[in-house]
Image: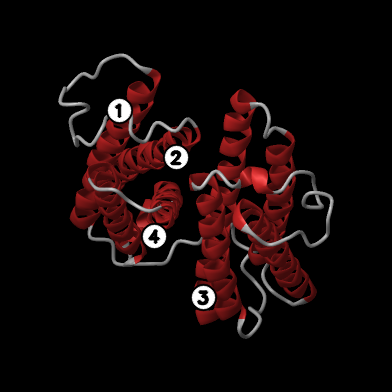
Amino acid sequence: MQKLGMGMTAQRFRWLTLWTCIGMFLVLVVGVVVTNTESGRGCGTDWPLCNGKFVPAYTLESLVEYTHRAVSGIEGLLVGAVFIWTLLIKPAQKEALIYSSAALLFTVAQALLGAAAVIWPTSDAVLAIHFGISMIAFTFTWLLDSWARRWAANPEAVARGESISAAPQGKTSGAVPTGLFGSVVAILVYCYGVVYIGAYVRHTASAGGCYGWPLCNGELVPKINGATGIAFAHRLAAVVLFIAILALTLWIRKSMAPRELKTLANASLALVVAQILSGWLLTATLDSHDIYVFTSLLHTIIITAMFSLLCLLAIRAKQLSRR
């Protein structure tokens, strides 16, 4: 009976973490739609009401902005619930508690920053931070769901205080290269910088500063000014990120690292290539606003997935190196 009850608790917790992760993904998506449709002022300077009303007047801008607020509000409740449940579970390993605490922290931070942006005039540089915070919040909900999935598959291990691996037995054998954890963390920090520049491009509507791909306005190095300088800086930063992840992947492949780390590195490399190609799609659809909204969403989804995978790669490199 104890084993059955433990398994049912793990399954229910997994469902809650899954819906929390999906909810955070929707917050990201709707947030990008708000920016790309210029709906940030759809509710005026009122918060949490919309133009002084609980149910706003039907306009595209107010509908998009209020949807973003509603989804964010529901997600806040889910994140709070999963945090409380994690406390009640009292897992011997603190991994789940770290993920749920960080998800709550960054969810509150993005809500406060979003409210401040509505009530007070906010610069594009500050607004660009909002997406980065949302991306980190999603990453922690995804990591928590990954942990919950492993717990549901092996609830007895958590009860005994054992660490539950993200990979099947046999995929964790091997030697983790010295310095791998620090290298992945350095790439993660740089990746966040690239994401910030991309968000700044979106908030300043600077994507049109570079027409054509891979050249910018037909030049290898264009005149660096205004929107062109911002867009070109993002492209250049993305190229450096690709080189860094390529070098990291080749290093892991040539080492005696566990297969799990090699799989995560290969997936990260595939996603950074997909991200570059989605950047080309963005450039190709600049003149078609309706299509541009969807290509921008694709760009956002890929970079979020890549950032989350790199986080998992860093975590597993640290955990496996201890063994």
Question: Foreground mark, 3 or 4?
Answer: 3
| Residue placed under numbered mark 4 in the picture | 157
| Residue placed under numbered mark 2 in the picture | 25
Determine contact: label 1, label 4, CB under 8 Å.
no
Q: Is residue 317 visible?
A: no
The type of residue carrying mark 4 is Ala
| Residue placed under numbered mark 3 in the picture | 318
Label 4 Cα crowd, 10 Å radius (few <14 / some 14-19 / many 20+): some
Left or right of 144, for residue 101? left
> Which of the 4 image quadrants contains residue 102?
bottom left
In percent of width and height, residue 166 lies at 53, 58
| Residue placed under numbered mark 1 in the picture | 66
Badge 3 or badge 2: first in the primary sequence: 2
Secondary-structure class at tag 4: helix
Question: Foreground mark, 4 or 2?
Answer: 2
Left or right of 247, for residue 190? left
> Which of the 4 image quadrants contains residue 183?
bottom right
